[in-house]
Amino acid sequence: MIAYDPTTNPLNNNEWSFPFLECIHILGFTLSIGTIALLDLRMLGLALQRHTSRELAKALAPWTLVGLAVMLISGPLIFSSDPNMYLRNLSFRFKMGALLLAIVYNYTIHRWAAMKEPAPAAGKLVSVVSLGLWISVVAGGLFIAFF
């Protein structure tokens, strides 16, 4: 990696900039994962049963995308504060793998199931996998500080 001095990064030179950016990051994933979880709970038959999963998928898609955009912009900025530390961190690498899988799954299988409303068992399986992937992303992020 190119010689990088973390002390030159603005996130490391101001007491409030890194925590503020982390709050923005958390708001982004709360919005995106929250909207995905609402759809998953609907597909599991546990919430919002007056709406079809297709209706919810269409209504929540823009909010999910905004949350993902915020997350995918703020995340690399946080990473820039100390890339060497993050690249050596097992939890960070786990999180990045889980994030990639979760995003691909969300925009392929999960989206297909929400729009087609398959048999209840298939919809439930798709939702459980989705929730598991997103929980893995959050868990990976939480454990970055410990590994």
Image (cartoon, rainbow, N blue to C red):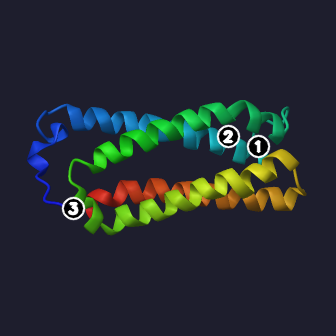
Indicate the position of residue 51 as horizontal and vertical percent values: 84, 33
> Badges 1 and 3: C-beta atoms under 8 Å apart?
no
Residue linked to disc 1: 42
Task: Kindly indicate whether the residue at mark 3 contacts the one at mark 2 (C-beta within 8 angstroms).
Answer: no
Amino acid under label 2?
Answer: Leu
Q: Where is residue 136 in the image (x, y as percent from the top left)?
A: 50, 60
Q: Where is residue 131 in the image (x, y as percent from the top left)?
A: 62, 55
Q: Which SS class for mark 2?
A: helix
The C terminus: image quadrant: bottom left
Q: Marks 1 and 3: which is nearer the front?
A: 3
Report if residue 45 is visible in the image. Answer: no
Label disc, if present, on residue 84 of the rendered structure: 3
For the point 55% across and 33% down, the residue is: 66
SS class of the residue under badge 1? helix
Query: Do tag 1 and tag 2 residues touch (Cβ < 8 Å)?
Result: yes
Q: Nearer the viewer, residue 2 or 139?
A: 2
Callout 3: SS: helix
Is residue 97 depicted above or below 72 in this figure? below
Q: Distance between the residues labelled 1 and 3?
A: 41 Å
Could you tell me how far apart the alpha carbons at marks 2 and 3 are, in whole angstroms?
36 Å
Left or right of 42 in this view: 133 = left
Give the crowd class for mark 2: few <14, some 14-19, many >=20 residues within 10 Å. Answer: some
Mark 1 or mark 3, earlier in chain: 1
Disc 1 residue type? Arg
Q: Which residue is drawn at 46% across and 53% down?
A: 138
Q: Name the residue under label 2.
A: 38
